[in-house]
Image (cartoon, helix red, strand yellow):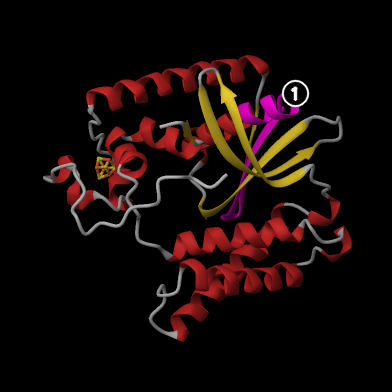
Amino acid sequence: MKRVSPSRLSDFKQCPQLFKFRSIDRLMEPATIYQARGTTAHLALQRLFGDDASERTPERLFDLFRQAWAEVRDEEYTHLFETVEEERAWGIESLELLANYFTVEDPTKIDPVDCELDLIEEVQDVTVRGILDRIDENAAGDLVVTDYKTGKAPPERYALPAFFALKIYALLTRRHFGRAPVELRLLYLNGPTLYSLAVTGQQLDAMERQVQALWAAIKAAIEKEAFPPRPSRLCDWCAFQGICPAFGGTGEPTPDMARRPETIPA
Ligand code: SF4
């Protein structure tokens, strides 16, 4: 492996076996309506900030969602719905979620520094690639990183682990802009809920050491070919239960399982 994303580091932390299935075996996972909603909503929100501030209305966001869906549907999600009614119900539910966005913040008052910023940075001896949903400046001119979530917001007491990947995005931001963000925001459309975390340079230094340690553990696991499964309640949503050793599987993909191409487009 030459580089890793915050999500894949998060996989390894959660379950090394899951990391192997996704990153080493590069197994494809079945497309879901939740994934389709996330992809389309992210695209629509990104494009909303390409419009003049005064045009960033709910109706405009709904139109952008419909346009984005017409694009990604034919590329990635052709067989997701069995009937037009199912697809329509999904679309209506998605627009209701997007309407929630306007109860959390007013996009006409936001002037982003960048949206969907693709960053590839060296963090010690590991190359990390991540795509930031949005980066803004607050009133004091400090950087604030926002990540949109279309899944359900966790209760507040469980929210902190959800910031793990975002703290790695903060590291990439610090490398790229030469200054660290002061605030990380998880904006859940399904809630709607906004979780915000203040970060300091020392916390990011600690995160850098954690990334370094995780990368060392990944290299050791690859060398020993040892990726122990770590069962948790997240197994209920894991697409690989059927081949996972924790559930009686061999830990190896079956020949009929589809794999992603080896190279990640930059
Ligand atoms: S089923 Fe659970 S233990 Fe097995 S790979 Fe998936 S998350 Fe890990």
User: Is ligand 1 within 8 Å of the beta carbon of the residue shown at mark 1?
Assistant: no
Total number of numbered discs in the rendering: 1
Q: Quadrant of residue 244?
A: top left
**Magenta stretch, residue numbers:** 171-195
> x and y percent of residue 109 in the render?
85, 51
User: Is 184 included in the stretch rendered in magenta?
Assistant: yes
> x and y percent of residue 117 in the render?
68, 43
- In this orientation, which residue lies closer to the viewer: 8 or 156? 8
Does residue 95 appear to the left or right of 179 in the view shown? Answer: left
Image quarter of the C terminus = top right
**In the image, residue 33 above or below residue 88:** above
Q: Amino acid at mark 1?
A: Arg
Q: Residue at x 26, y 34 (%)?
A: 230
Which residue in the protein does label 1 denote?
A: 179
Figure quarter occupied by ligand 1? top left
Q: Residue at x 44, y 66 (%)?
A: 33
Does residue 144 appear to the left or right of 24 in the view shown? Answer: right
**In the image, residue 123 above or below residue 13:** above
> x and y percent of residue 219 in the render?
35, 23
Q: Residue at x 52, y 72 (%)?
A: 73
Q: Residue at x 25, y 56 (%)?
A: 257
Q: Quadrant of residue 58?
A: bottom right
The residue furthest left is 248
